[in-house]
Amino acid sequence: MATKTTEAARGPDVPGPRAGLPGRIHDFLLRPEASVIVVAIVLVIYFQFANANFLTDANLQTLSQFIAAPVIIACGEIMLLICREIDLSVGQVFALAPFVMEKTHDVGLPVIASMIAALAVCAGIGWIIGFITIRLKVPSFITTLGMLFLITGITLTISRGFPADTPGGPLLTNLMGNWGYAEFCWALGLVAVMHIVLRHTRWGLHTISTGGNAVAAAEAGINIDRIRMGNFILTSTLGGFAGLLEAFRIGSTDPLAGGSNIMFLGVASGVIGGTAIAGGTGTIVGGLVGGIVLGVLQDGFTLQGINAFTFDIIIGAAILLAMVANIHLARLRGAGTA
Amino acid sequence: MSGAVALRAERIVKKFGNVTALDGVSMHVARGEMLGILGDNGAGKSTLMKILTGYHQPSSGQVYVDGAPVALDSVDRARGFGIECVYQDLALVNGLSIYHNLFLNREILRPWPFRLLDHKEMRRRAIAALEDIGVHIPSVDLEVGRLSGGQRQAIAVARAVASNARILLLDEPLAAMGAREAGLIIDLIERLKARGDIAIVMIAHNYAQTLEICDRIMLMQHGEVTYESAAAETSPAELLEIVRREYRAARAG
């Protein structure tokens, strides 16, 4: 009896990983990022054929600058989406951070210290969002909707509605965003770090567990409130950091920079990249590729002379298409056939 | 056949405000033995289970593990005494692989400085742990969301055993399962029983199935144990008759 094995478990309906090149391609296509990677490559090829200026250094710089901030924001939002939360106010934190840096610099802090102060304020905002959501049990959608207006008001108040100049010497300014690809390099670096956090640390595994099955996670002894709180703080801090980079690149800050637009680009990057709104699954690399797709669309159509109104139509359609593909590929994955 | 008594509860009373959920319930289970707790919804089975897992604390009464009185004041505490509960459908995270689920919150990390997850080692040990209890799944890399109900239940049981459960509590392990799936779990439970070092308590609705796989059964009604018997010495018909009699008595009283 003790050595008898459960043959019935070897169901024919559950395929294992497949061997060989066709098998690998098959497995790749079933990954959530796969469809969007294919779309990104097709778009780049299309725009290069349609307009020879697409793959030039000048245009790639523009493109990389457009992509960077949404991708950095996506890194946070993806973690939140995975644990079934969302932060609608991260675009406002994006606008607030440079002003905190500038004001603290004005009162005498060195630039680096005022950058840290700005990020600390952003982390504090994340903590407040987490506190209201977790302890006071307000859904994060509502919490951050309130914070969205509140932070805009704070930014407008401390800036008095006027833009401010970004402090800092040339080296720091170049490093933090003024050099053409600096912002994008930061984005790539953060994507690499967050990918490792999601796939190769307990934090990432527990984030997936919190969104996938909060009861099971809590049963296993995972402190799900701590996981959610940490991801709120992370998202706000990343949003503030993206705002600082943008301020260094442009050299000044508009109190109405970023806003809901950049937040939605971040969320859309994540969702197009294969992160499910329903939680429990997501991919940081997908968020990067999703951001690239949105950027390439914007930039490519701008080069073609298509106007901004049309662009919104295209982005909307792209999100819908990506989600349809996403859900149906997930169903195929679930059924184990393709 | 059975070893020493692993878990004993004496005259457990649990009150929620004015409601008495458990009214002096006593039970015991030995290593290598399997106790089935039967009863309708609201009979107090789940409350008893939650006291044994440390989720609820009894209003009065005492729990003993290996003969020593213990205070199960938290789930972690109960787990420390080797008490693990497997809840149907609540135990696993669908988006994670089998091996990640087996090591949920007990992950193996690589050495300093980065403390990253040691996926390879977890995979290897997961394969060994499943092998150990004779559960064969094509690949431990599969997401548990792709498994059948029986396979998921087997993984959940495997996790409890791999984390050194010595007292295994199963909450409706066979509910909503087809014959093949149920057979899978029954085989697994039989193998665990045969090891002789694990005491198993199962709560269930289905009289016939429970009598078939358990050594002893306990019938609970309105917070009390109304009948106790060796499984071989009773029948579904007799149990049904007892339930009816109690029901009529309760209505008359």
Image: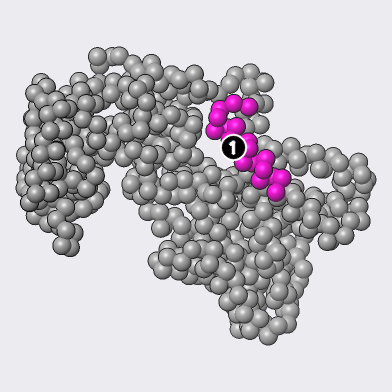
Viewer-proximal residue, B19 or A197?
A: B19
Q: Which residues are magenta?
A: A320-338
Give residue B67's quadrant in the image: top left
Of B110 and A242, nearer the camera is A242
Name the spot of residue B158 as percent of width and height, x first.
Answer: 32, 30
Queried whether the magenta region covers residue A332, the answer comes back as yes
Asked where in the image residue B163 lies, by quadrant, the reply is top left
Q: Is residue B128 magenta?
A: no
Horizontally, residue A50 falls left or right of residue A79, namely right
Q: Main secondary structure of the magenta part?
A: helix
Quadrant that contains the C terminus of chain A: top right
The picture places residue B69, in percent across and down from the top left corner, at: 7, 46
- What's the chain of the residue with tag 1? A
Taking the image as drawn, is residue B159 in sight? no
Q: Is residue A133 visible?
A: yes
Task: Identify whether A20 is placed above or below A164.
Answer: above
Percent x, y for residue A224?
Answer: 40, 54
B199 sits left or right of A155 in the view: left
The residue under the point 51% across, 63% down is A140
Residue underneath mark 1: A330
B88 or B106: nearer the viewer: B88
Residue at disc 1, secondary structure: helix
Q: Which residue, as the protein is rendered here, is positioned at the far front?
A: B252
Residue at x 24% of width, y 35% of height: B204
Q: Is residue B87 above or below residue A24?
A: below
Callout 1: 10 Å neighbours few (<14), some, many (20+)? some
**Whole-percent x, y for residue A244 in the image:** 66, 67
Q: In the depicted view, which residue is nearer to us: A111 or B216?
A: B216
Amino acid type at mark 1: Ala
Side of A34 where B173 appears, left or right: left
Residue at 43% in and 46% down: A213
